Image: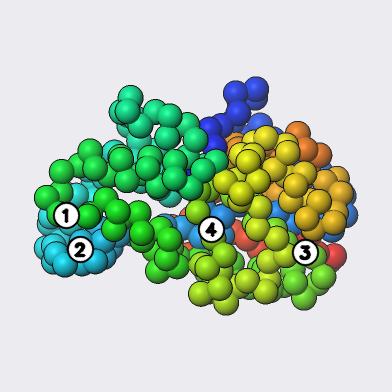
Amino acid sequence: MPDHAEPPQTSPPGTAEAPAARRASRRPVKAVLFDFHGTLAQVEDPQRWVLEAAAACGVTLNRVRATSLADRLLTAGRAGGPLPARVPPRLAELWADRDLYQHAHRGAYTGLAETVDAGIDGFADALYERLLTAEGWLPYADTAATLTALRDAGVPVAVVSNIGFDLRPHFDTWGLTDLVGAFVLSYEVGRCKPDPAIFWRACGMLGVDPEQTLMVGDTPADAGAVAAGCSVLVLPAAEPGRENGLGAVLDLALPG
């Protein structure tokens, strides 16, 4: 997603998860880094996404048409996932740079949406604009409680995301900004996960050593933090609005 780099090719997916979690239980955790999409929040239901974008263009869709459009748009590729079945050659450069530049992120995803003929003027831009609002996302049910518990325990937190737009307004809307010590966004720092440099930047912004830091995510790109010296916990992404297993972070990060 908007939020993820391509998986590293140096090791099979998932190989870092269990050892990383075991290491985290043996090492003191002084800070926690969180991925955004699939870890702290999830994009809204595809049908709602389509209905709201169409409404922003002055068009009311029935549920059947909205469902059909949503299915086609997901195949084309949606910011927040899934990845496109095929990237048209004219979008290849934007797609490769989507998490490094705001214009590339918008251009890639509006371009993919435009491959689906919805017959609605401005529809591709309206779909993208939903990403830029907190209403287009749902924090997981255990996100606020987890971040609050870490703050209360004096454990600083950073959000580390492969993304092409600012997440801070979302956290402002959700009342979570004060629980996050730093936002380390790929398009701002010029590095994407799994590059160790983005994790080092996050640790530096929090003033902690990587060896005392836990990275929490849901993809092999997040597990790339192992190469930066961090411990890693990889969680399977849950359905929007449900708990995402973030209580495991507190088991690892807080004293018993």
Q: Amino acid at mark 2?
A: Cys
Q: In the rendered structure, which disc, 4 or 2, sits on the residue that comes first in sequence?
A: 2
Tags 4 and 1 in contact by the CB under 8 Å rule?
no
The residue at which mark 3 appears reads as: 156
Q: Position of residue 182 (x, y in %)?
A: 70, 60
Question: For this rendering, which residue is in front, 119 or 135?
Answer: 119
Q: Position of residue 27 (x, y in %)?
A: 87, 50
Q: Position of residue 67 (x, y in %)?
A: 19, 54
Tags 2 and 1 in contact by the CB under 8 Å rule?
yes
Return the residue found at the far front.
103
**Mark carried by residue 255:** none
Mark nearest the camera among 3 and 2 is 2
The residue at which mark 4 appears reads as: 166
Q: In the rendered structure, which disc, 2 or 1, sits on the residue that comes first in sequence?
A: 2
**Distance of mark 1 from mark 3, alpha carbons?**
45 Å
The residue at which mark 2 appears reads as: 57
Return the residue found at the far top.
10
Q: Position of residue 143 (x, y in %)?
A: 59, 67
Residue at left offset 40%, top offset 69%: 135
**Distance of mark 2 from mark 1, alpha carbons?**
7 Å
Drawn side of residue 88 relative to residue 157, left or right: left
Q: Secondary structure at mark 1?
A: loop
Q: In the rendered structure, which disc, 3 or 2, sits on the residue that comes first in sequence?
A: 2
Q: Secondary structure at mark 2?
A: loop
**Can residue 226 be seen by looking at this rendering?**
no
Mark nearest the camera among 4 and 3 is 4
The residue at which mark 1 appears reads as: 121
The answer to which quarter of the image holds residue 53 is bottom left
The image's colour scheme reads rainbow
